[in-house]
């Protein structure tokens, strides 16, 4: 059996993100509250709006960083498990199982061409996109590797 | 987003990833309208800044033409005041800030090993707000009553006497601020989250560090500007009295609000310039930057101090003596981290194998001439002396030395430095050097005599003056025409390089440091398809 774990690169740990956001907003709020105390309350809503946009941006990249995809390929099946915490259900886990002989992999170029490509695993009319957070080069590499595995009749022989 | 894939086969462990076809940009106008690629957006910012350099520069030419000799020759005083106001607003918000955001867009992902910015769609939006906001601002010149004429500082009650242009000016400033904020949020999140494995904070190139601190300053200072101009608007149209003495308000408080934003803004403009120069000087000295950590801490210190010096712009409003002392001393304190930077750049060159290509020439001019602006700043920091200099041409000379041979020269140096990486072509070195010498000479002819004018008592923002100021004004105007024409040569060199020229290698220069030099020239449309590992 072959298994793949896909995860996005993220140099910001949740702890560092909290420090980063907290330090920025602390400065921002000191300024805004100081202005408000002097009677210049219109500074406060702009500061609040900015803090909210920044929070949205940090949370978005943090959530994106926690995404995981697991792909298991064995003689009989291809199992894809996608974990996107906060997206669906309690833990955002979604699982798909395909019969390996009927599974095809396709890398669709972006439309327009400079948009990111899309990597799809399909079987009997169902398709699942994988590696949406990968770079184009990594998607191409993954596609080549999976295509090699899917074309191989006997995975247990270690001929791949 | 740079990503890791693991393939587990029994005990085997390999990384997926192979070479692939690099598909390039889209075609036509839609490429530029809808692009989310950091290189496209960086190019848009930089070209926009170049256009605005000539729009704001044309206004400077009007100003210097009118001041060529005493008396009123070409424009009426109100239009002259519109020109001084719009020149400043356009050069600050429409030219120099977008130029540095353009550099950040192009270079930060390349420098930290990221395939793109963290929030690409937001990036597109941040840019496209800019031409609309600038269009609104410029359009005020054609409105009844003309454009804003009360100075870029928008002090009430003068700014409230503007005609129809007033709300449009405020709206344009809001939009320009919004563009800056969104750009900063994107840059700061990119730096924090998108660094390649191994790229720790203290391994980041200094340009990235200066932008990280700049983004902090922008995020902290911009709501104050937004709040301040909104209060002007409500005073004018909604009957509030934040700054109207008749209703119990105080116009001087606007000055506090404005400069609380305005002084960090000065460093928002100059810190990325420090970053660019810190990349160029080591490259052409063939030595690592001297005192990297000290440079980072000096930048952070300057960022912090920028928030506690604002009232040195308004010593003459009648502050308590303790206030004047505090702001005088805190302003002088900034000289220490700035001197650390100047000494470290100088130490980097010490016993280096120096060569003097155009980016290095502009960086050296930056080093000398920015320091002149710094010294005149120290003179202005002395509160009792400032009472003499305040609102004279000495102040004009000071901030132009900081902003033109300071920030603008650094931006031009950066453009020459990275143009081969952007276009894949070497620029014409001979023309570059001609551009440098014309610019360096004419900028000094323009602004150095303004020190003498200010010390002799010539006030700023006047279209006419006493005959005693005639000679230095004429010399200053001649210098400014030369400087303006020299920048046409810069535009020609940029266009010529985009269109063709000798092919640039990946490294471009002699063994430069940094990830950006590991990718081919021109940098492929998609870079770092696999995250580089920084050791």
Image (spheres, helix red, strand yellow):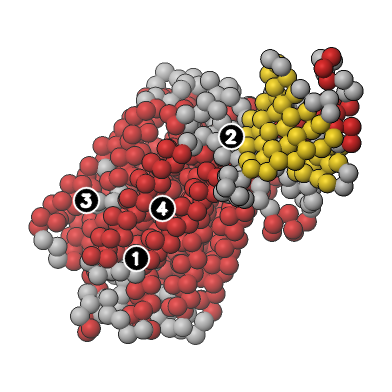
Say few, some or many: other residues with alpha carbon within 10 Å of mark 3 (under 14 / 14 to 19 / 20 or more).
Answer: many
* First along the sequence among labels 3 and 4: 4
| Mark nearer the viewer, 1 or 4 | 1
Observer-nearest of B21 and B301: B21
Q: Which mark is residue B218?
A: 4
| Mark nearer the viewer, 2 or 4 | 2
- Residue B53 position, x and y percent, is 53, 57
Marks 2 and 3, how far apart at CA? 47 Å
Furthest residue toward left: B321
Observer-nearest of B383 and A111: A111
Marks 2 and 4, how far apart at CA? 27 Å
Q: Does any portion of residue B366 appear in the rendered image?
A: no
Q: Which mark is residue B381?
A: 3
Residue with the mark numbered 1: A43
Marks 3 and 1, how far apart at CA? 28 Å
Q: Which mark is residue A9?
A: 2
């Amino acid at each position: 059996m072959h298994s793949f774990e896909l995860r996005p690169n993220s140099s910001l740990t949740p702890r560092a993100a909290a420090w980063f956001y907290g330090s920025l907003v602390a400065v921002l709020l000191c300024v805004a509250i100081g202005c408000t105390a002097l009677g210049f309350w219109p500074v406060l809503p702009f500061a609040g709006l900015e803090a909210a946009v920044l929070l949205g941006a940090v949370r978005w990249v943090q959530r994106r960083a926690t995404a995981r995809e697991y792909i298991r390929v064995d003689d009989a099946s291809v199992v894809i498990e996608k974990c996107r915490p906060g997206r669906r259900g309690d833990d955002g886990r979604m699982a798909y199982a395909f019969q390996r002989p009927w599974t095809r992999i396709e890398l669709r170029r972006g439309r327009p061409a400079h948009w990111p490509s899309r990597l799809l695993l399909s079987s009997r009319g169902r398709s699942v996109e994988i590696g949406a957070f990968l770079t184009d080069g990594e998607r191409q590499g993954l596609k080549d590797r999976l295509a090699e595995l899917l074309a191989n009749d006997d995975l247990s022989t270690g001929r791949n | 987003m740079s990503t890791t894939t693991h393939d587990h086969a029994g005990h085997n462990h390999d990384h997926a990833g192979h070479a692939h076809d690099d598909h390039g940009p889209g075609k036509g106008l839609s490429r530029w309208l809808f692009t989310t690629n950091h290189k496209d957006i960086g190019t848009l910012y930089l070209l926009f800044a170049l256009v605005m350099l000539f729009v704001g520069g044309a206004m400077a030419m009007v100003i210097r033409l009118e001041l060529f000799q005493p008396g009123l020759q070409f424009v009426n005083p109100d239009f002259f005041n519109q020109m001084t106001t719009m020149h400043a607003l356009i050069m600050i918000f429409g030219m120099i800030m977008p130029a540095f955001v353009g550099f950040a867009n192009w270079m930060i992902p390349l420098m930290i090993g990221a395939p793109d910015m963290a929030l690409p769609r937001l990036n597109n939006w941040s840019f496209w707000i800019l031409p609309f906001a600038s269009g609104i601002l410029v359009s005020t010149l054609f409105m009844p009553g003309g454009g804003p004429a009360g100075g870029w500082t928008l002090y009430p009650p003068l700014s409230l006497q503007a005609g129809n242009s007033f709300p449009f000016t405020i709206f344009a400033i809001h939009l320009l601020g919004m563009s800056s904020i969104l750009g900063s949020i994107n840059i700061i999140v990119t730096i924090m989250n998108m660094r390649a494995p191994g790229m720790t904070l203290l391994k980041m190139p200094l340009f990235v560090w200066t932008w990280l601190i700049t983004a902090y300053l922008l995020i902290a200072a911009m709501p104050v500007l937004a709040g301040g101009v909104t209060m002007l608007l409500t005073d004018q149209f909604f009957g509030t009295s934040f700054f109207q003495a008749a209703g119990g308000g105080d116009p001087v408080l606007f000055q506090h609000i404005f400069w609380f934003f305005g002084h960090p803004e000065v460093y928002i403009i100059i810190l990325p310039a420090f970053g660019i120069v810190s990349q160029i000087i080591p490259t052409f000295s063939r030595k690592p930057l001297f005192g990297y950590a000290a440079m980072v801490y000096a930048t952070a210190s300057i960022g912090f101090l920028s928030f506690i010096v604002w009232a040195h712009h308004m010593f003459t409003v009648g502050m308590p003596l303790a206030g004047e002392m505090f702001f005088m001393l805190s302003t002088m304190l900034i000289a220490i981290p700035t001197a650390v930077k100047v000494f470290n750049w100088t130490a980097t060159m010490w016993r280096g194998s120096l060569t003097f290509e155009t980016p290095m020439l502009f960086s050296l001019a930056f080093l000398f001439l920015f320091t002149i602006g710094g010294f005149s700043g120290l003179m202005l920091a002395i509160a009792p002396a400032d009472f003499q200099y305040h609102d004279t041409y000495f102040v004009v000379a000071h901030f132009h030395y900081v902003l033109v041979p300071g920030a603008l020269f650094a931006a031009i140096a950066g453009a020459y430095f990275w143009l081969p990486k952007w276009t894949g072509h070497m620029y014409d070195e001979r023309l570059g050097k001609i551009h440098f010498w014309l610019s360096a000479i004419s900028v000094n002819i323009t602004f150095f005599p303004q020190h003498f004018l200010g010390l002799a008592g010539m006030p700023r923002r006047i279209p006419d003056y006493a005959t005693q100021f005639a000679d230095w004004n004429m010399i200053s105007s001649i210098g400014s025409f030369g400087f303006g024409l020299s920048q046409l040569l810069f535009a020609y060199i940029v266009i010529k390089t985009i269109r063709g020229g000798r092919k640039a290698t990946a490294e471009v220069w002699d063994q430069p440091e940094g990830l950006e030099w590991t990718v081919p020239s021109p940098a492929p449309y998609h870079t770092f398809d696999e995250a580089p590992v920084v050791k």
